Image (cartoon, rainbow, N blue to C red):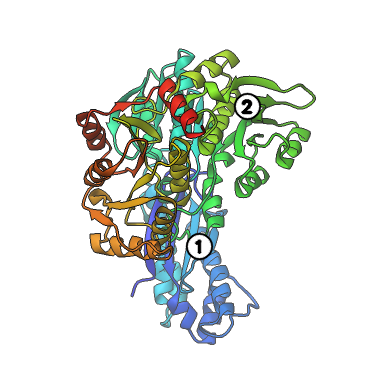
């Protein structure tokens, strides 16, 4: 069995280094099980003296292996002609696997280095450990250098947005504000690449390829990049730096993938984005999220925090250190600076995305977008106008909190892909429900979520809705079957006593069934991911119309009557 589980080339800043790196996932079973004399001989060959290798298969042996593999990389590098090489090694949830990373300047030679490290570990059980190191170093020395990293240095201002929830909405709001300022804006997100408001390439471009396509466009004057967890882990960030970064929040999502098993680890991944913000730039951080607020300890940029609480201790701390803050005071979005009066920008009731302040998450997205736009230098009055004209509809924010009226029934379409997103959707649905009316929810999940998260979504949906139906997402089964996902969602619903509800093969079918049984004043919500355009078409065919600001405001008032 080979020791090399995976060799991945990271093209730009990543979890391990602020520049391009090679990431190796290595199986250390042979070293973990080797007799002490073999482990000692291996340590001696790579230059480790007087080490305690620990008993085979022990936790101490694993710690020895981490140290020894780091030293092995440096030994091969030194013997092949590279005298100084930074190395990072991490354990994983599998005690027999570790991750090793080192920067690279020449692609082929760096990959050969990775293969060489694995070949030495493959030789550990045998008697030729000494020669294996020399042979690996010789192969590295003789290899072709290969291409240099493709990491781009931006030529235009860049705002980079990351987080678990809200990053797409926030990036769209920032792009809209910049366009309001008359700039030709390019932005990339999970929907595709947009140039001056037009979709030029559909697909998930929240990784380095999206940023690259935006910056390659010669007419772009301002760039907004959405940076997702997967892009950072699988490819690295495609830019050497950004001018302003935004971290919306960090919550459980995509855990159990690419070695990220905990929320703390996920936060570390997200922190890569503000870590590469220019020293004279701004890192916009959510002061209400402890993991995000803690990122101020790893950034070079100036901190600009946002919070719905103007008396937040985090705001006081940042202001005392010379930073900035955006918050809500007396229903106004307000900016705070050290030793100055609060600057009221705009009332929440005049910001359509907040639904008169009803949407807690979109209030936070508004605070984040306003902070980033001001931090990048967009004039105050333009920022205000941009916030007033960005609407929760299919034109400005497709797939996120889109409101429609189908007769006297309200329909809300949202991605709602995790616990926080679903709770936000239900919060909004309640905010427009007339007294005595019902919430009807179309529940659906993506197959690459952990079992417990899928069950939790079923539990939340059943607990907080009056009528529940499952609408599956064929394009996003990701190795699961309909029945498997159905069983998990139903198991979660059963925890709150809900055991009987329908299941449909598509999102459109679920929406049609729910609207068909809705009564006047009821609110239908759909977790929509796979069939957004088909859902919009169905609503239009059913005589539905998008809600404008006045209609939404009337619904909010009727709900609170």
In the image, 24 versus 473, the foreground residue is: 473
Tag of residue 12: none
Q: Quadrant of residue 137?
A: bottom left
Q: Quadrant of residue 243?
A: top right
In the image, 282 versus 451, the foreground residue is: 451
How far apart are labels 1 and 2 at the CA level? 57 Å
249 over 193 or under it: above or below:
below
Could you tell whether 300 is left or right of 66 in the image?
right
What number of labels is visible? 2
In the image, 467 versus 295, the foreground residue is: 467
In the image, 120 versus 445, the foreground residue is: 445
Could you tell whether 304 is left or right of 458 in the image?
right
Question: Could you tell me which residue is drawn at 40 percent across and 47 percent down?
Answer: 235
Name the residue carrying label 2. 331
Tag of residue 73: 1
Question: Could you tell me which residue is drawn at 26 percent across and 60 percent down?
Answer: 479
Q: Position of residue 264 (x, y in %)?
A: 57, 56
Label 1 vs label 2, nearer the camera: 2
Q: Position of residue 193 (x, y in %)?
A: 34, 31
Callout 2 crowding tier (Cα within 10 Å): few <14, some 14–19, many ≥20: some
164 over 61 or under it: above or below:
above
Q: Earlier in the sequence, mark 1 or mark 2?
A: 1
349 over 502 or under it: above or below:
above
Could you tell whether 345 is left or right of 388 in the image?
right
Callout 1 crowding tier (Cα within 10 Å): few <14, some 14–19, many ≥20: many
Query: Does dot 1 land on a helix, a strand or a loop?
Result: helix
Query: Does dot 2 land on a helix, a strand or a loop?
Result: loop
Q: Position of residue 198 (x, y in %)?
A: 32, 23
Q: Position of residue 54 (x, y in %)?
A: 59, 82
Question: Taking the image as drawn, is residue 154 in sight?
Answer: no
């Amino acid at each position: 069995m080979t020791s090399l589980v995976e060799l991945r080339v990271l093209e730009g800043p990543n979890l391990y280094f602020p520049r391009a790196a090679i990431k190796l996932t290595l199986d250390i079973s042979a070293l973990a099980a080797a007799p002490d004399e073999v482990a000692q001989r291996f340590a001696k060959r790579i230059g480790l003296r007087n080490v305690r290798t620990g008993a085979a298969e022990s936790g101490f042996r694993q710690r020895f292996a981490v140290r020894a593999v780091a030293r092995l990389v440096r030994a091969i590098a030194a013997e092949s002609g590279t005298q100084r090489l930074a190395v990072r090694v991490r354990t994983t949830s599998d005690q027999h696997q570790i991750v090793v990373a080192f920067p690279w300047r020449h692609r082929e030679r760096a990959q050969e280095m990775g293969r060489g490290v694995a070949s030495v570990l493959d030789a550990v059980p045998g008697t030729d450990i000494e020669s294996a190191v020399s042979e690996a170093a010789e192969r590295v020395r003789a290899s072709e250098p290969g291409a240099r990293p493709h990491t781009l240095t931006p030529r235009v201002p860049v705002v980079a947005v990351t987080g678990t929830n809200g990053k797409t909405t926030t990036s769209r709001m920032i792009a809209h504000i910049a366009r309001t300022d008359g700039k030709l804006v390019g932005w990339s997100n999970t929907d595709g690449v947009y140039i001056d408001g037009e979709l030029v390439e559909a697909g998930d471009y929240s990784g380095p390829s999206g940023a690259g396509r935006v910056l390659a466009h010669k007419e772009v004057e301002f760039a907004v990049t959405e940076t997702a967890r997967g892009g950072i882990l699988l490819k690295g960030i495609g830019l050497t730096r950004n001018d302003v970064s935004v971290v919306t929040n960090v919550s459980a999502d995509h855990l159990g993938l690419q070695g990220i098993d905990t929320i703390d680890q996920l936060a570390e991944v997200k922190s890569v984005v503000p870590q590469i913000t220019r020293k004279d730039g701004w890192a916009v951080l959510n002061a209400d999220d402890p993991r995000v607020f803690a990122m101020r300890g790893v950034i070079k940029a100036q901190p600009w925090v946002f919070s719905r609480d103007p008396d937040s201790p985090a705001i006081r701390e940042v202001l005392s250190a010379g930073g900035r803050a955006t918050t809500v005071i007396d229903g106004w979005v307000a900016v705070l600076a050290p030793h100055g009066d609060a600057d009221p920008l705009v009332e929440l009731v005049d910001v359509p995305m907040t639904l008169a302040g009803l949407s807690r998450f979109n209030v936070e997205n508004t605070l984040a977008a306003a902070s980033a736009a001001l931090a990048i230098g967009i004039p105050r009055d333009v920022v205000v106008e941009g916030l007033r004209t960005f609407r929760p509809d299919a034109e400005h924010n497709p797939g996120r909190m889109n409101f429609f009226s189908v007769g006297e029934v309200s329909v809300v379409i949202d991605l709602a892909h995790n616990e926080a997103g679903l709770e936000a959707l239900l919060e909004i649905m309640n905010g427009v429900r007339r007294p005595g009316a019902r919430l009807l929810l179309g529940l659906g999940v993506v197959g690459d979520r952990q079992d417990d998260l899928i069950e939790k979504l079923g539990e939340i949906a059943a607990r907080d809705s009056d009528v529940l139906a499952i609408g599956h997402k064929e394009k996003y089964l990701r190795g699961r079957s309909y029945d498997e996902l159905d069983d998990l969602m139903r198991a979660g619903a059963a925890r709150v006593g809900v055991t009987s509800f329908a299941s449909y093969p598509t999102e459109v079918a679920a929406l049609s069934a729910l609207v068909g049984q809705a009564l006047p004043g009821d609110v239908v919500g759909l977790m929509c991911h796979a069939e957004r355009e088909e859902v919009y078409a169905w609503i239009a065919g059913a005589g539905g119309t998008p809600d404008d600001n006045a209609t939404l405001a009337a619904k909010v008032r009727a709900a609170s009557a």
